[in-house]
Image (cartoon, helix red, strand yellow):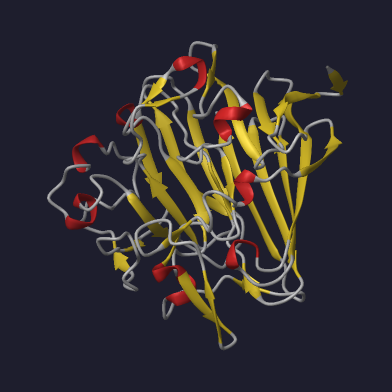
Amino acid sequence: RLLLMSVKKEIFGIHPSGKEVYKFEIVNKQGMKAVITNFGAILISLFVKDKKGNFQDVVLGYDSLEEYLDNHPMFGATVGRNVNRISNAKFELDGKTYLLDKNRGNHNIHSDKEHGFHKVIWDFEITGENSVCLSYLSCDMEQGFPGEVYIKMTYTLTETNGLILSYFATPNKRTILNVTNHTYFNLGENIFSTEFCIHAKSFTPVDEDIIPTGEIREVKNTPMDLTKYSFIKDRLNANYHQLQIEKGYDHNYVLDHPHTGFRLIAQTRSMKSGIHMDVYSDMPGMQFYTSNSLKNTIGKNGVVYKKYDAFCMEPDYFPNAINTKGFEKPIFDSNKNFISTTMYQFY
């Protein structure tokens, strides 16, 4: 076991390719600990102190590399090249049509669930006493997207109990880049004991296939309104079509002050554990997902994860933006790098 300051590195398992896969433990002076693997740039665990002074792992995941090889729910995953949906699994760029994997009906979700960024082995560098930098070279037409892309993703644990995720990607020609993290958070027992606040006055309604219709709708006077701390248990089965589609939230929120850069975008707190989490980002949108599709998945320590056991908060460009008039396009090239930062701050 190699000890480098406060970052520990050890073998997590052997990939089917024969390559060694590592996991990294970053611990700060408060005892908060993040566990990351260079397979998929995945966040495995995040131990945070609760109101009783005990450390709780607040993210869902698995015990072994073998389980992450499948990882259909995409626990802790770095998602790329494009997170969320692309309608009809195709898009047009500079007059050329690109075809993607049809992995959700006729549509595409999360680029390629078998060959996406969360299924490759990333290079790594321990870049300080509290951070690990992971990097990957995605070849031209990988997953169906044009252009070669070199991406670096850095996890940093701060001394003030923040976990920072920094993305920097350089394509060699025009392409789509909409990268985020798909961690499932559980701050207490399940989402019913957790209050949510999202700094967004609008959201993007979806059709029956969870594809945005193109409308930007105000949340006011609807169950989508999370502008103040709210419990959502009674809303999940509300008589509101947007929530009836999936019996829960799987929606993109149009965040306030989209062009002001890094800012507070969402807040959560568990009444059971006393753990608070604030989310900061520089993205224009955030997907809020209440694990509606989670079905009796065996996770860490044999725990069975069920529907509504966790939530995801994924800062991003709006879903299907490339095909939707009026949505900001996540198009980048050699003169315009993809740069983004997310922070999950605990207290």
Residue 210, percent from left and from top: 32, 59
Left or right position of 158 against 198: right
Q: Nearer the viewer, residue 19 or 343?
A: 19
Residue 166, percent from left and from top: 69, 49
Left or right position of 303 against 162: left
- Can you name the residue that lies furthest to the left here? 239
In the image, is residue 204 above or below residue 78? below
Residue at 31% of width from left, 71% of height from top?
213
- Can you name the residue that lies furthest to the bottom here? 95
Q: Nearer the viewer, residue 224 or 324?
A: 324
Question: Which quadrant is home to the C terminus?
Answer: top right
Residue at 59% of width from left, 28% of height from top?
66
Left or right position of 68 against 187: right
Question: Quick check: can you spot residue 105?
Answer: yes
Q: Quadrant of residue 8?
A: top right
Left or right position of 85 against 235: right
Q: Quadrant of residue 282?
A: bottom right
Residue 51, percent from left and from top: 48, 16
Q: Nearer the viewer, residue 342 or 21?
A: 21
In the image, is residue 166 above or below residue 37? below
Question: Quick check: can you spot residue 342?
Answer: no
In the image, is residue 312 above or below residue 108? above
| Count of numbered badges drawn on the protein | 0
Q: Nearer the viewer, residue 200 or 214?
A: 214
Residue at 52% of width from left, 50% of height from top?
113
Question: Which quadrant is home to the N terminus?
Answer: top right
Residue 169, percent from left and from top: 72, 61
